[in-house]
Amino acid sequence: MLDGSDLAALAALHALLETGSVTGAARRIGLSTPAMSHALARLRAR
């Protein structure tokens, strides 16, 4: 089952796919670039 951090990581991936850049995706969902990178790393680790 997905928890809140999983959903946030999926939202980060969705934003990345829509914008094509980590910086643009971070801006879109209101995260810093390092926080965005961390969210994507969590998703990759799963």
Image (cartoon, rainbow, N blue to C red):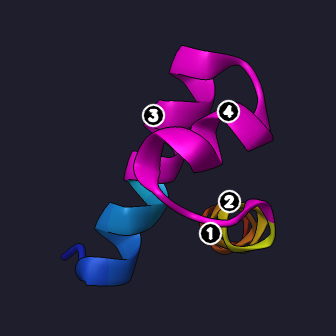
Callout 1: helix, strand or loop?
Answer: helix
Q: Which residue is mark 4?
A: 24
Q: What residue sits 80% from the left and 70% below the top? A: 34
Q: How far is mark 4 from mark 1, CA to CA?
A: 14 Å
> Residue 40 has which mark?
2
Question: Going from the N terminus, do you reach mark 2 or mark 3 first?
Answer: 3
Q: How far is mark 4 from mark 2, CA to CA?
A: 14 Å
Question: Going from the N terminus, do you reach mark 1 or mark 3 first?
Answer: 3
Callout 4: helix, strand or loop?
Answer: helix
User: Which is nearer the eye, 44 or 23?
Assistant: 23
Q: What residue sits 38% from the left and 65% below the top? A: 8
Q: How far is mark 2 from mark 3, CA to CA?
A: 10 Å
Please tell me whether residue 22 belongs to the stretch shown in magenta: yes
> Residue 39 has which mark?
1
Please tell me whether residue 8 belongs to the stretch shown in magenta: no
Q: What amino acid type is highlighted by mark number 3?
A: His
Instruction: Name the image quarter holding the N terminus.
Output: bottom left
In contact (CB < 8 Å): disc 1 and disc 2: yes
Horizontal relation, residue 9 to residue 22: left or right? left
Name which quarter of the figure residue 37 lies in: bottom right
